[in-house]
Amino acid sequence: MKILDFLFGWTGYEPLSFLLSGLNIIGNISFCLLLEYIPLRKFLRVKPRTAILLNAGLIVLCAAFYLCFPSLINESGKGQIFGLALYFALFMPLALFLLKGCFFQNLFIIAFSQCATQFILGAGNWLEFRFGELFFPDVYYEVALIAKLILCPLFLLFCTYILRKLFTAWNEELQTQLFWKVLWIIPVTLCVLTAISGTVYNLTENNSLSFLLSRIFGITALFVCIIMMTDIMNRERETAADKLKAELMNTAEEAYEKSRSETLSTLQAISCEKKTAARAIEDIIKYSKQSRYKEISDILKKHLAVIDKFSNERVCENEAVNALVTYYSSIAKKEGIEVTLKLSLPRTPGRIAAIDLSRIVGNMLENAIEACRLMEYGTKSIKLHSMITGDTLVLGMHNSFDGDYQMQPDGGFISRKRSSGIATGLNSIRSVAEKYDGSVKFEAADRIFKTSVKLDMAAGKPVPRQG
């Protein structure tokens, strides 16, 4: 305090007033910043540490500016209004830049944070006029500061919670994006209406209660709007999921028919080769009676090569999966991807329909090949295996990828090849696993993506109907 007395010639409680007012302004800015970045942090252009350092640097610059002009902060109302101006001039543009692809969502949160700070300000000032002189007769606005220090963390937790619920419900589709283009107007309107009802410049002991009530009504209306919007977005998300599910079923049926026709073609080819082999045996018997050993040797070499070809292409007893795996394996090998297969699948895996098993294996291999294609360096590899334990069929896959991935708030993976961000392949695998009372686990670490699927094959259990 003596340093401030010496620098500015203050006496008495003036240095304390300066420090408390400064702490008040920094608290308001920090509250707005935390509420702005936490719900949208997955959209950051930079690492969270970089964003923290940039904003901390701006706060230090603002503090230095206030020290150069102490009259701005010594008067509480003027200091807070100027702090708000600095927020809109410096911190808000930085947030709009750092949080990419969510301009209107960012505007929504900025207006929301202003409504919340208006309420905290109103509550603190009302307590200041109501109880300040009773507890701190000399510097009674300490009551307002104490109230804000208590309310800010509580409101930050609650507001972050409801905003996370809102943004979890947001599915990032085009229709929802158009929704956001008008949605931000609601908190902005409430914020403006609340500000019109009174500011720190015209705040007195007589109108402090109406000042507080206007802010209570504003923040309450905003909370109700957010709850309603969350419910609407959740319903939209469920509708989109049902539509996607129907599309996936149609796609799976087409894939199954394609794999079935390929399997029949393969079986027909094998049948032809068997007939050819039977004729070759007859020729061998005939040539052996004539001691024509050269002709016998040529026949054996030719047909052993054919036998090796078909034995290599058969990876399991299940015809549909065998055709599907052979098809994708040939694609992967042509693109320089190492493929390791160790499948133990019976011709009829209990109650699991061939179309559903094909959906799982097909999506796993298609996703793995797509991930390997995105790799710019390193060994591209796919390892697919299966095993049966009791009535449980376990499918596992390890495939390499470039190490770049994003997570949704609920823990799911975000697709990089679709603008919606929805990982349709992973969702399809999960839906089939749930259909057969199974489970799915997706993991990504050290440039390896791991998929594990468990399915209940018990023939006695009914299979839930889809749709």
Image: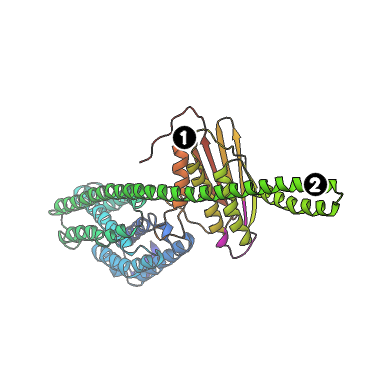
Pointer 1: what residue? 437
Q: Where is the N terminus found, in terms of image quarters?
A: bottom left
Q: Give the range drawn in magenta.
A: 372-382
Please tell me whether mark 2 sits on a helix, a strand or a loop: helix
**In the rendered image, the vertical position of residue 91 relative to residue 139, given as above or below:** below
**In the rendered image, the vertical position of residue 162 relative to residue 25, given as above or below:** above
Is residue 466 within the magenta segment? no
Looking at the rendering, which quadrant does residue 91 occupy?
bottom left
Q: Where is the C terminus found, in terms of image quarters?
A: top left
Please tell me whether mark 1 sits on a helix, a strand or a loop: loop
The residue type indicated by label 2 comes to: Lys
* Residue 188 in view of the camera: yes
Residue at 65% x, 59% y: name it.
379
Residue at 74% x, 48% y: name it.
280
Q: Where is residue 273 in the image (x, y as percent from the top left)?
A: 66, 49
Image coloring type: rainbow
Q: Position of residue 302 (x, y in %)?
A: 75, 54
Q: Is residue 320 left or right of residue 280?
A: left
Residue at 14% x, 52% y: name it.
210
User: Tags 1 and 2 in contact by the CB under 8 Å rule?
Assistant: no
Pointer 2: what residue? 286
Q: Main secondary structure of the magenta part?
A: loop
The residue type indicated by label 1 comes to: Asp
* Mark pair 1, 2: CA separation: 59 Å
In front: label 1 or label 2: 2
